[in-house]
Image: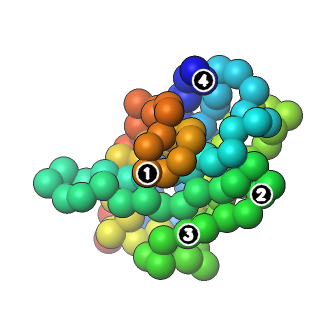
Amino acid sequence: QVQLVESGGGLVQAGGSLRLSCAASGSIFNINFMGWYRQVPEKQRELVAFITRGGSTNYADSVKGRFTLFRDNAKNTLYLQMNSLKPADTAVYHCYAGPAYDPISWGQGTQVTVSS
């Protein structure tokens, strides 16, 4: 089972950008789905985006046009480029591997805070 470690979170002003990384302990080449969820306390976890093995992507309406998800199989890393950040994007971001409805691996999460 692959282990995932996120990085790249932090504090940024509204309108700014961050790039999150999710490094896997092994090859991600054969993982069919990978993606990101975000969690705000006392709110339901939100699926932000996912990417297929073939590179097809799907985004939540709340981030479309602002976030870009891509994977580098050579580096066994998943990236989430976040632009035009809003305070509403503040959350703990978790990467996962496997189908979104039942991931096989989770990262520990990285905090993203967007100030107004």
Displayed quadrant of residue 12: bottom left
* Residue 2 image label: 4
Residue at horizontal 30%, vertical 55%? Answer: 45
Dot 4: element: loop
Dot 1: element: loop
Q: CA distance from mark 1 to mark 3?
A: 15 Å
Q: Nearer the viewer's eye, disc 4 or disc 1?
A: 1
Q: Which residue is mark 2?
A: 55
Residue at horizontal 41%, vertical 30%? Answer: 108
Please, which residue is most extreme toward the right here?
74
Of the residues under marks 1 and 2, which one precedes in the sequence? Answer: 2
Q: CA distance from mark 4 to mark 1?
A: 17 Å
- Vertical placement of residue 79 versus 68, above or below: above
Q: Nearer the viewer's eye, disc 1 or disc 3?
A: 1
- Vertical placement of residue 61 versus 30, above or below: below
Identified by mark 4, the residue type is: Val
Check disc 4: other Cα within 10 Å, few if <14, some if 14-19, many if 20+.
Answer: some
Identified by mark 3, the residue type is: Tyr
Q: CA distance from mark 2 to mark 4?
A: 19 Å
Quarter of the picture containing the C terminus is bottom left
Identified by mark 2, the residue type is: Gly
Of the residues under marks 3 and 4, which one precedes in the sequence? Answer: 4
Q: Which residue is mark 1?
A: 101
Identified by mark 1, the residue type is: Tyr
Residue at horizontal 63%, vertical 48%? Answer: 33
Of the residues under marks 4 and 1, which one precedes in the sequence? Answer: 4
Of the residues under marks 2 and 4, which one precedes in the sequence? Answer: 4
Q: CA distance from mark 1 to mark 2?
A: 19 Å
* Residue 59 image label: 3
Displayed quadrant of residue 7: top right
Quarter of the picture containing the N terminus is top right
Q: Nearer the viewer's eye, disc 1 or disc 2?
A: 1
